[in-house]
Image (tube, grey):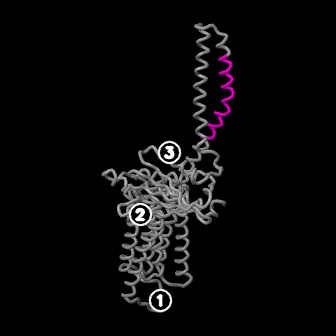
Amino acid sequence: MSAIAAGPNGASEVWRPLRLETLVRIRWIAIVGQLVGVLFVAFGLGFPLPLLPCLGLIALSALANVWLPARFGAANRPSPRFAAIQIAYDCVQLGGLLALTGGLQNPFALLLLAPVAVSATSLPRRATFLIAALAILIASVISVWHLPLPWDPAERIVFNRVYVIGIWVAIICGVVFISAYTMRVSRDARQIANALAATELALSRREQLSALDGLAAAAAHELGTPLSTIALAAKEMRAEAEPGTPLAEDVELIIAQAARCRAILAKLRNLGSDGGDPFAQVPLTDLLAEVARPHEGRGKAILFYHENAAGPPPVFRRNVGLLYGLGNLIENAAEFARETVNIETAWDGEEVAVTITDDGPGFPVELIARLGEPYLTTRVREAQIAGTQPSGGLGLGIFIAKTLLERTGARLSFTNIAANGHAQVRIVWPRAALTS
């Protein structure tokens, strides 16, 4: 079971809570630790403590651990609300044990941070805030109302009030820090995971289209010979058929339909010619012209420049990720350009560089340093051009392009080159990456 919550920039985030089996195992570890601790204090150290109430709370958790898998199944993924209820129960149960064994004077009060950490890594922000608030409330209550700390009856132990307040403040600070820090780190990890999944999906679809193009071209090639034979036989039959007879009309129909089939097969052959062999070598200039061709019909001029070119154009190994990444950046530039997109190439013995510049409003200044992160949209540029409200978008285009190109060994940088905008993307490959 998954839950969808609003993420940054309005993008949706998919929350996949821990499996029930994982929550149950964590609780079993806590139960065993609590049981060992209580029995050791009571029988190992001989300190007086309310043994039966403590064992009752531990038994209640054990009973819940037995009932939950039997009722829902160990592989069940509880909803965020149900998972939050279980973690909240763990907080309350631990708070009850601490209240029976000295409150915040008990060194195991530090364990109140554990449920907060579990919540921050697996639950939405609202649920984590509620559990953190519950942990702070429990810490506040047991700092005032609690039974004495189990200790040697022959010795008298007294804790200074300031020391107890210090423990309370430390636990509150720990709850706030762990919830905020862990939640932020886990959110970034989820964003990266979801964005990489989207990248793999886009790449897989592109590979499937390339495979389909090649299959269509192969089918067209195989069907060409028998279709030519049919057309030739039909023409010979037309020479022998009497004009105006039904047979002559049928022969003309066969010839016309054969010609139509040959035209369709010619289109299928052209599908494979654009993608070519995915392992073929192709010069950089031809590669850029290939990926830019689908975006030339947008009313924007796409101009190519070659500067500081030492020798013939470098040769790249064509692959789906390279085509998709370059095409995505050129498409983005053509979408936001006012009139022109400039694609400059330069190469020498050490590096190969491609610079894509559009004459649009440029990247938002506050986002330049973060471009390439998932779910970071630059649709505000489009709204500036059209004079409308920013349109929705997942903000995965630049992330996917950057990820795919970096897999080929490239380094990407994003800048604005003029006061009024002009977004520029520079892609640099070391020569060694082209031969690997």
Disc 1 secondary structure class: loop
Q: Position of residue 69 (x, y in %)?
A: 53, 57
Q: Is residue 78 left or right of residue 285?
A: left
Quarter of the image where the C terminus is located? bottom right
- Looking at the image, can residue 224 be seen? yes
Disc 3 secondary structure class: helix
Q: Which residue is mark 1?
A: 153
The disc, 2 or 3, on the residue closer to the chain's N-terminal end is: 3
Q: Main secondary structure of the magenta part?
A: helix
Q: Nearer the viewer, residue 90 or 311?
A: 311
The disc, 1 or 2, on the residue closer to the chain's N-terminal end is: 1
Q: Position of residue 262 (x, y in %)?
A: 61, 28
Is the residue 287 above or below the residue 234 in the image? below
Task: Report the amino acid beneath label 2.
Answer: Ile
Q: In the rendered structure, find residue 294 and report the number of the disc placed on it.
A: 3
Q: Residues within 10 Å of mark 3 (few under 14, many from 20)?
A: few
Q: Which residue is mark 2?
A: 417
Q: Are marks 3 and 1 in contact (CB under 8 Å)?
A: no
Q: Is residue 207 covered in magenta?
A: no
Q: Position of residue 305 (x, y in %)?
A: 51, 55
Write down the quadrant of residue 3 in the picture: bottom left
Camera-nearest label, 3 or 1: 3
Q: Nearer the viewer, residue 219 or 305?
A: 305
The disc, 3 or 1, on the residue closer to the chain's N-terminal end is: 1
Disc 2 secondary structure class: strand
Write down the quadrant of residue 170 in the picture: bottom left
Disc 3 to disc 1, C-alpha distance: 85 Å
Is the residue 128 above or below the residue 217 in the image? below
Taking the spot 36% from the left edge, 56% from the top edge, the residue there is 380
Is the residue 220 above or below the residue 44 in the image? above
Magenta-drawn segment: 213-235
